[in-house]
């Protein structure tokens, strides 16, 4: 039980990677808050966690781009469980388009979800972590925190930005027991990826099968997708690691697509 009674907030945990992280944390004894735009799916995930692991789970309606909703959601967790030990800022979307066609509104939406979301959730949990003298903040980056791809200007920019934010939090939080790290997954088969396969095929003028084989998995060592369980395992490692030896870091899990 690596996270026994730890209070963990996972944003975007109603689906995909965040959902797997919430389940993995609960399996290690954590109390998990599922914070998501989609409150029905979040409630389903929370009910499933309680049924499977017998641990407390909360569904929190939260748009991570709204300061009011983020603060209210974190306060809800504090009122219920008295503190917060782990934040996984994971909520995200993808919009693909060549830069010359990229709508300014889409650019702002992407930066708001990925960067404002990371900033606002971190800002809301930090006072509680500092009060306790410990905490772990984990950002969901991407191979696109380190590498560029065409059509993904806003995503690549935002994911690179998370590395900077994590390093600043690591420096500000170090003396107060708060660590901050970034997980950088390769392609994981979630709704976020399924949606972009036909979009990329259209934009690049290739088949959907080629998008998967060449664009998504072409640079991996074995042609395989990373899985939500792979990423949940990395998220557990960062959450349960107990000292400042591991802070301000990023870890790529991508079947060798990107090697540091
Ligand atoms: P997903 O679409 O399965 O899940 C994303 C979740 O975020 C959904 O439940 C959605 O409702 C929620 N969400 C979206 N906007 C939100 C908002 N404004 N406020 C609160 N919740 C919001 O996607 P996923 O693939 O699990 O992606 C999760 C994270 O992992 C994202 O940050 C994504 O960029 C990152 N990532 C994904 C991959 C991949 O290949 N799937 C690779 C690298 C990084």
Image (cartoon, rainbow, N blue to C red):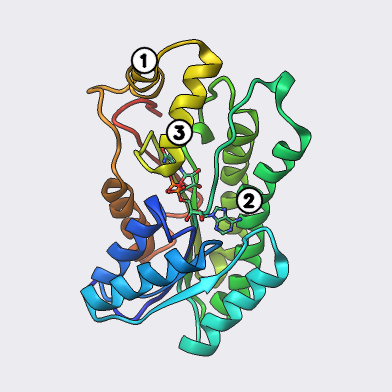
Q: Would you say the beta carbon of the disc 3 residue lies within 8 angstroms of ligand 1?
A: yes
Q: Residue pushed farthest top?
A: 205
Q: Vertical placement of 41 versus 220: above or below? A: below
For label 3, the crowd category at 10 Å Cα-Cα, with few meaning under 14, some 14 to 19 and many 20 or more, is many
Mark closer to the observer (2, 3): 2
Rounded to the nearest whole Å, what is the CA distance between mark 3 and mark 1?
20 Å
Residue 184 screen position, x and y as percent: 43, 41
Check whether the beta carbons of the residues at disc 1 and disc 2 lie within 8 A of each other.
Answer: no
Q: Is mark 3 on a helix, strand or loop?
A: helix
Q: Is mark 2 on a helix, strand or loop?
A: helix
Whether residue 3 is visible: no
Q: Residue at x 50, y 70 (%)?
A: 177
Q: Would you say the beta carbon of the disc 1 residue lies within 8 angstroms of ligand 1?
A: no
Nearer to the camera, 207 or 107:
207
Q: Would you say the beta carbon of the disc 2 residue lies within 8 angstroms of ligand 1?
A: yes
Mark closer to the observer (3, 1): 1
Q: Residue at x 62, y 40 (%)?
A: 158
Q: In which quarter of the image is the N terminus?
A: bottom left
Question: Which labelled disc corresponds to residue 210?
Answer: 1
Rounded to the nearest whole Å, what is the CA distance between mark 2 and mark 3?
18 Å
> Which badge, 3 or 1, comes first in the chain's sequence?
3
Residue 63 screen position, x and y as percent: 62, 62
Q: Residue at x 46, y 68 (%)?
A: 40
Task: List the residue tagged with mark 2.
Answer: 113
Q: Is mark 1 on a helix, strand or loop?
A: helix
In the picture provided, is 65 more to the left or to the right than 50?
Answer: right
Residue 72 screen position, x and y as percent: 64, 77
Task: List the residue tagged with mark 3.
Answer: 143
For label 2, the crowd category at 10 Å Cα-Cα, with few meaning under 14, some 14 to 19 and many 20 or more, is many
Give residue 143's quadrant in the image.
top left
């Amino acid at each position: 039980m690596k996270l026994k009674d730890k209070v963990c907030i996972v944003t975007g945990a109603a689906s995909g990677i965040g959902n797997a992280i919430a389940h993995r944390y609960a399996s290690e004894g954590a109390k998990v808050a599922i914070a998501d735009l989609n409150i029905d799916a979040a409630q389903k995930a929370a009910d499933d966690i309680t049924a499977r692991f017998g641990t407390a789970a909360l569904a929190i309606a939260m748009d991570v781009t709204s300061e009011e909703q983020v603060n209210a959601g974190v306060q809800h967790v504090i009122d219920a469980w008295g503190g917060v030990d782990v934040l996984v800022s994971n909520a995200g979307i993808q919009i693909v388009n060549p830069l010359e066609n990229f709508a300014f509104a889409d650019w702002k939406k992407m930066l708001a979800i990925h960067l404002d979301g990371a900033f606002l959730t971190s800002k809301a949990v930090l006072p509680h972590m500092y009060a306790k003298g410990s905490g772990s903040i984990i950002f969901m980056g991407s191979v696109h925190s380190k590498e560029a791809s065409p059509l993904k200007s806003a995503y690549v920019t935002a994911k690179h930005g998370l590395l900077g934010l994590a390093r600043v939090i690591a420096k500000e939080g170090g003396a107060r027991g708060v660590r901050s790290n970034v997980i950088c997954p390769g392609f994981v088969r979630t709704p976020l990826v399924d949606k972009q396969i036909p979009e990329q095929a259209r934009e690049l003028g290739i088949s959907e099968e080629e998008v998967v084989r060449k664009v998504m998995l072409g640079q991996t060592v074995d042609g395989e997708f990373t899985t939500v369980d792979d990423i949940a395992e990395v998220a557990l490692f960062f959450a349960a690691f107990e000292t400042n030896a591991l802070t301000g870091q990023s870890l790529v899990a991508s079947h060798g697509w990107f090697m540091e």
